[in-house]
Image: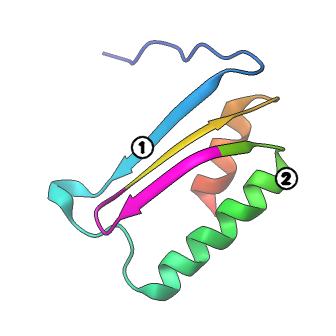
């Protein structure tokens, strides 16, 4: 069954999580983590996203942010890099 459509509107806060399978590490090494941070910063600037909070451990990450654009375009951009 497909997930329900995401309700999107300007000024909304979004909570995004990502986890490794069975709490496996999500970054292979420090270089992977550094590349992710670089892409995150680029996407925040490119799409004018306000990041309100974040956290990550070896096995997962959490972000809270708001947007002023189509969320799907930014999420797909960082996922395909």
Q: Quadrant of the N terminus?
A: top left
For residue 47, what is the image quadrant?
top right
Looking at the picture, tell me which residue is in the foreground, 53 or 78.
53
Which residue lies at the image location 59% right of the left edge and 13% below the top edge? 7
Pointer 2 residue: 46
Q: Quadrant of residue 37?
A: bottom right
The CA span between labels 2 and 1 is 21 Å
Q: Position of residue 46 (x, y in %)?
A: 85, 53
Residue 3 located left or right of residue 13: left
Q: Earlier in the sequence, mark 2 or mark 1?
A: 1
Where is residue 42 drawn, in percent x and y?
A: 77, 62
Magenta stretch, overall SS: strand
Check whether the beta carbons of the residues at disc 2 and disc 1 lie within 8 A of each other.
no
What residue span does the magenta drawing correspond to? 52-60
Front one among 78 and 17 = 17
Seen in the image, is 6 located left or right of residue 11?
Answer: left
Q: Is residue 74 left or right of residue 5?
A: right
Residue nearer the viewer, 38 or 75 = 38
Q: How many marks?
A: 2
Q: Secondary structure at mark 1?
A: strand
Q: Residue at x 55, y 18 (%)?
A: 6
Q: Which numbered disc covers residue 9?
A: none
- Asked where in the image residue 73 lies, by quadrant, the reply is top right
Q: Does 80 lie within the magenta span?
A: no
**Tag shown at residue 17:** 1
Q: Position of residue 3 (x, y in %)?
A: 39, 18
Image position of 26 with respect to 70: above or below: below
């Amino acid at each position: 069954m497909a997930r329900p459509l995401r309700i999107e509107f300007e000024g909304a806060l979004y909570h995004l999580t990502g986890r490794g399978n069975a709490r496996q590490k999500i970054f292979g090494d420090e270089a992977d983590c550094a590349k992710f941070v670089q892409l995150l910063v680029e996407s925040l600037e490119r799409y004018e996203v306000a990041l309100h909070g974040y956290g990550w451990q070896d096995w997962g990450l959490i972000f809270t942010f708001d947007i002023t654009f189509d969320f799907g375009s930014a999420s797909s951009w960082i996922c395909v890099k």
